[in-house]
Image (cartoon, coloured by chain):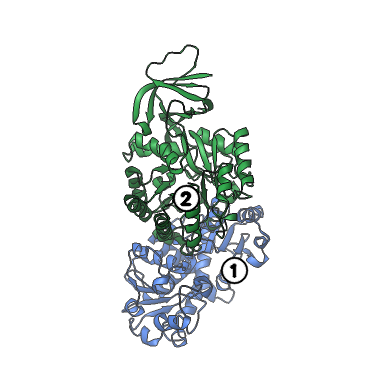
Chain colours: A green, B blue
Amino acid sequence: MKTLIKNGRVLDPAHQIDANLDVLAVDGKIAQIAAGIELPDAETIDAGGLLVVPGLIDIHVHLRDPGYEYKEDIVSGTRAAAAGGFAAVACMPNTNPINDNKAVTTYIRQKAAAEGQVRVYPVGSITKGLKGESLAEFGDLQAAGCVAVSDDGRPVTSGEIMRRALEYARSFQLPVISHAEDLSLVGDGVMNEGFVATQLGLRGIPWVAEDAAVARDVLLAEFTGARLHIAHVSTRGAVEIIRAAQRRGVPVTAETAPHYFTLTDEAVRGYDTHAKMNPPLRGAADVQAIRDGLADGTLSVIATDHAPHHVDEKNVEFNLALNGIVGLETALPLTLRLVEEGVLTLTEAIARLTIGPARALGLPGGTLEVGRAADITLVDPTCKWTLDPARLLSRSKNTPFGGWQLKGAAALTMVDGRVVYQR
Amino acid sequence: MVFRHKHILGIEQFTREEIHFILDTAESFKEINSRQIKKVPTLRGKTIINVFFEASTRTRTSFEVAAKRLSADTYNISASTSALVKGETLEDTAKNLEAMKPDIIVMRHNASGAPHYLADRCDFSVLNAGDGAHEHPSQALLDLMTMRQHKGRIEGLKVAIIGDITHSRVARSNLLALQKCGAEVRLCGPGTLLPTGVEQWGVPVFHRIEDAIDQADVVMMLRIQQERQGKTLLPSLREYAMYYGLNRSKLSLAREDAIVMHPGPMNRGVEISSEVADGPQNVILEQVENGVAVRMALLYLVSGGEQLEV
């Protein structure tokens, strides 16, 4: 099986390639990257006017499978991922049952292999049952296919447990992903603490709830020397803490999500539950700091925190609505907006969606290399479209971007040389 | 003036002219309340349901009295008797009420934004009788009506609002209404009860009640709600009373003709001493009286106002 992608602009940030080249995939692997490849017997894809980039990688999604299939499952979630240009996703362990053991990891891997559209990398839990009390079996989880551990959705409240998690994970070279939040400071807050919350009469979640927790975990990473990745960074202070730590050599990486560089807490006005997420949408100064952090590489990863919820879970009073939005099918155009606005170069933007996430979790992929799996995304950077939530492939439609005019989309997504999505 | 609002969700939605128009309308209704026969046929045939998801005696009764004096048919649903306790969603509750074809739903809810939720989804008029820590528009209007009666104006009045600003919908609605009408508002409370970003309202914020009250025309005390404040915001009611409670000596710092207001129910000996609560400067029961007139005006205006006969 030979597939030839011709006439595209190949952009591979890891190798500083930005040139008009053709890419040949043979039997699921990249066989050749060169100008003017002619191969009459290959199936040819015309990529004229398109970007040819490494398959995008989203290291923060909730596939909700097992347990919450009414929100999403591995089939619908990976279909949405493919439509968003993602060739691989890492899925968080807050399923039911929780992915704190080999059996659940194996179920996810097997179902993804059999029915999924894209690569699925399970993330195991840090603590058993996400309870924050005792460590899950990292070795067993890793052997079954977990690429990292996280209690995402909840912080590890005990400093002692987090310390031991980092120390223990280090022996398996397993990255620990921190959902950094001081719950005592969060209290019963439902949106960013600030003037908008004050005007709306909604309880606030202060930035210091995130900053204090990020500071603790960064210091624990420094103390233990273990690999730490900070999930969904949303505040200026967190960016500054991470930047300072990276400068002194602490092995910490960090991600943010498109909504944190696109929206502020102003989006909550009107009590729009699609603007409710955790961490919450922050103020304008935070959004600017997130953009600066992406630009200077402090934040080397854009991940969606794709969090599908049923309409009934959002169509309630603001304080009762569940946190989170779907993101797989909007991440690429929202990231390209940063290029349009001059925040990132195109190469940087693609890097945050490819090699950045691959390196953060030590995953294969994120670059185009001869001999490696042919995970390739073709990006149409200029097509304009309006987001109609009803047309999302995710089972859930909880997005604050409904009706937005977007520019740029995945034209084609290929995993192992197989086309899994074509616009 | 043509009143174009289908819903009354908050002071936010009104202009200064509209606020005065509502107060003028309320003045005209006030007279009905002192007649021998306190009833006019204005809203005959209208159905008004009071849906109170949060306990209330004063506001619910005030709305009910207002509606009945205008001859509307009124029904009351409270949290303890409603399907809410059986786990029904707000949308289902609303749709079921809608099926009974009410003209107005008066709603109190502990969730900020709940009346907006209803207004977005239903055909009837929604009148916000207090939503979470967001707004309580009828309270602010009756407060302004009381101030206007005593001072002849709102513009230029120095109004000190003192207490738990963070959790108070009364404070928010009053602040907005007073700002729109040109009063000089001052906010005061301990640091734990002042919301983040409070200074962005553009009014002076004080930590010492003495500074806030200085030369004030109106002193508005807010209720301390132990159940809302939890355990971490105040060390004790005793200390709160010492530093933020209004007594005669603190009140003497205000203008001699200052009036003292309280939205009720009062915690005597906490935010207000009995000597002040019962003293000559208090207008607390006038607030309650004006409440009925203001609510009559609001029900009348959202029902189509001028086309109706008074």
- Element marked by disc 2: helix
Q: Position of residue A59 (x, y in %)?
A: 48, 42
Q: Quadrant of residue B63?
A: bottom right
Determine whether label 2 and label 1 are within 8 Å by CB: no
| Left or right of residue A401, residue A99 in this image | right
What is the CA distance from the residue labelled 2 to the residue labelled 1? 67 Å
- Element marked by disc 1: helix
**Above or below: residue A106 compared with residue A224:** above
Q: Quadrant of residue A18?
A: top left
Q: Position of residue A391 (x, y in %)?
A: 54, 35
Name the mark on residue A199. none
Q: Position of residue A245 (x, y in %)?
A: 35, 53
User: Can residue A36 be seen here?
Assistant: yes
Where is mark 1, residue-wise? Answer: B64
Task: Give the amino acid type for the residue marked by disc 1 in the picture.
Answer: Glu
Residue at the image point whose x is 32% and y is 44% from the top = A296
Quadrant that contains the N terminus of chain A: top right
In front: A278, or A341? A278
| Left or right of residue B98, residue A179 in this image | left
Mark 2 or 1: the one toward you: 2
Q: Residue furthest top?
A: A40
How packed mark 1 is, by other alpha carbons closer than 10 Å (few <14, some 14-19, many 20 or more), is many
Residue at the image point whose x is 46% and y is 26% from the top = A371
- Tell me how many marks there are: 2
Query: Which chain is indicated by disc 1?
Result: B
Q: Position of residue A88 (x, y in %)?
A: 51, 36
Residue at the image point whose x is 40% and y is 66% from the top = B175
Task: Give the amino acid type for the residue marked by disc 2 in the picture.
Answer: Arg
In front: B104, or B83? B83
User: Can residue B305 be seen here?
Assistant: no
How packed mark 2 is, by other alpha carbons closer than 10 Å (few <14, some 14-19, many 20 or more), is some
Where is mark 2, residue-wise? Answer: A170
